[in-house]
Image: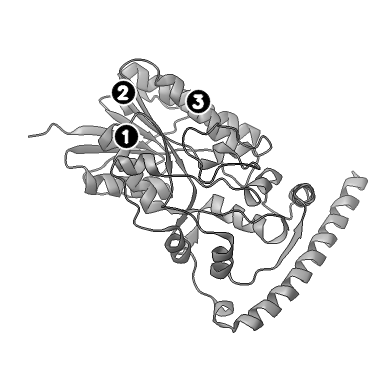
Amino acid sequence: MCVPVTVVITGAAGAVGTRVVRRLERDLEAVDIRAVDRVVVGAGEGVDVKIVDLAVDDLTSVFAGAATIVHLATTVTPDVDDPVADDLELAILRRVLDAATEVGVGHMVVLSTAMVYGAWVGNPVPLTEEAMVRPNPDFGWASVRAAVEQLALEWGRVPGRVVSVLRPTALVADDALGQLARVLHAARIGIAAEGDPPVQYLHVDDLAGAISTVISARFDGVANVAPDGWIPPDSLADLEGPTARIRVPGWAARGIAALRSRAGLSPIPPGIVPYTSHSWVVANDRLRMLGWQPDYSNEEAWVVSHEPNALDRLPARRRQELALVAAGLVLAGILLGIVIAVRRFRRR
């Protein structure tokens, strides 16, 4: 009989964490799951639930006896630039790594993002794990994920330790876009930067499957997580249908995004604009070699994340006419917002 191994999952109440708990229950025969979060975790009867604040509580007792820690807890989101949250993110990771060291945990699984490669002119299509990590410097969320990677990989340089770093592309779920996917979509409509890069969408269930795979394989290294291939610009346009969009140079799109953000008119951080105009799609060969197989293609992930609406049922010509009208209204609204923002700035 196999001796059960203990896997600790931080952030277990989140969208990814809940699915990872369920996936490990299904995939691993001899496993004790310890679900950790600040709020109540909805999990099966066999799951050991711990209500823990990773920022202040003692973690050694929580991690004691664990073979693997899957660190999913996070304080940062791609739609908000918050230096305080960034610092807290790294401080919590250091506490997790220190406690793991103290109790002798040998395997860490850390979630990063494919955005750490950056969106640059001349990026290969697709990017492999050998590509340089160089996130666009004015998009803080990607820079923080790169720093998370660095801390985890440094911890793993000690003999006997294994670190699995996963770099997923934009996540979606049934009838819902993930936070990053929502911000990217918002940045591609209205006044948008010139450029039509290919895109990728990853279903959150496939990410949970990737985490299960690297735990089972005790994978040591970095792996991209994305479906096979990508959605070309023309195919994405067919999926999305007519959208209100006015194209401007990248520098202008960043400037408008900055003004809208400062005026509280938009959740689009200016630093995300390059990710809507240059390619950053990734290859999944390394994860495939471990036995991982996605259940959803990029197109399938996009489709299940969108509920059809009344506009989708209209004839194509009518949708195009409405999109043109909407584009004009968007431009007028943005110009009005800029005027208001400038007046507020002058008053201050």
Residue 286 appears at what percent x and percent y? 37, 39
Please name the residue shown 45% across and 58% down the image: 298
> Three-letter amino acid code at disc 3?
Gln
Please name the residue shown 68% across and 48% down the image: 273
Q: Is residue 62 above or below residue 317?
A: above
Is the C-beta separation of discs 1 and 2 under 8 Å? Answer: yes
Residue 97 appears at what percent x and percent y? 41, 23
Disc ID at residue 105: 2
Q: Disc 1 marks which residue?
A: 8
- Is label 2 in a helix, a strand or a loop? loop
The answer to whether residue 41 shows anywhere in this view is no
Q: What whole-number distance in Å separates the C-alpha atoms at marks 1 and 3?
A: 21 Å
Q: Residues within 10 Å of mark 2 (few under 14, many from 20)?
A: many
Residue 12 appears at what percent x and percent y? 38, 43
Query: How many numbered discs, if any?
Result: 3
Q: Residues within 10 Å of mark 3 (few under 14, many from 20)?
A: few
- Is label 1 in a helix, a strand or a loop? strand
Tell me if 161 is positioned left or right of 326 in this view: left
* Mark 1 or mark 2: whose residue is earlier in sequence: 1
- Is label 3 in a helix, a strand or a loop? helix
On the rendered image, what quadrant is the C terminus found in?
Answer: top right
Disc ID at residue 308: none
Quarter of image, res 62: top left
* Mark 1 or mark 3: whose residue is earlier in sequence: 1
Residue 310 appears at what percent x and percent y? 56, 79
Please name the residue shown 56% across and 54% down the image: 198
> Three-letter amino acid code at disc 1?
Val
Q: What whole-number distance in Å separates the C-alpha atoms at marks 1 and 2?
A: 10 Å
Q: Disc 3 marks which residue?
A: 150
> Three-letter amino acid code at disc 2?
Val
Quarter of image, res 247: bottom right
